[in-house]
Image (cartoon, grey):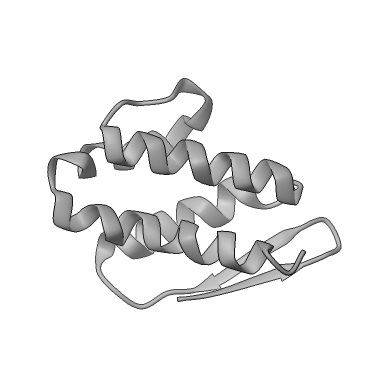
Amino acid sequence: MSIYLTREGMDLRHEAEGCVILTASADLMADAATGKTPAQMRELAAAFTQAVTSGTANPALGELNALTPVADFPSRIGCATLPWRALEEALQDV
């Protein structure tokens, strides 16, 4: 999982290899986070992680809620949250 951020407009790109849940999560993350500030990206990551671990949809997340059923499969929560953890790590340098 690789995350690429540009400082101009906070464009987010990724390269992901893994299961379909991981790649879907990475694609949804890139769409949702592009154009956001680092602080907004962190808030989005926290809200997504909460939704996926609890299984409770968050209206503010829009189509990211498609992955909330992953909560029923604890071994797959890590797949859904890995791109978001990579984003949070990338944001440490911003």
- Looking at the image, residue 65 sits to the left or right of residue 88; the answer is left
**Residue at x 32%, y 40% (from the top left corner):** 52
**Residue at x 39%, y 63% (from the top left corner):** 82
Measured along the vertical axis of the image, is residue 23 above or below residue 54?
Answer: below
Image quadrant where residue 53 sits: top left
Image quadrant where residue 22 sits: bottom left
Percent of width and height locating residue 25 = 40, 55
Question: Given the current orientation, which residue lies at the most extreme right position?
Answer: 8
Closer-to-camera residue (53/16)? 53
Closer-to-camera residue (85/22)? 85
Percent of width and height locating residue 48 = 44, 40
- Looking at the image, residue 90 sits to the left or right of residue 45; the answer is right
Measured along the vertical axis of the image, is residue 49 above or below residue 93?
Answer: above
Percent of width and height locating residue 55 = 26, 32
**Residue at x 56%, y 57% (from the top left corner):** 30
Image quadrant occupied by the N terminus: bottom left
Question: Given the current orientation, which residue lies at the most extreme front position?
Answer: 92
Image quadrant occupied by the C terminus: bottom right
How many numbered marks are there? 0
Closer-to-camera residue (23/78)? 78
**Residue at x 49%, y 32% (from the top left corner):** 61
Measured along the vertical axis of the image, is residue 48 above or below residue 30?
Answer: above
Percent of width and height locating residue 72 = 14, 40
Question: Given the current orientation, which residue lies at the most extreme top position?
Answer: 59
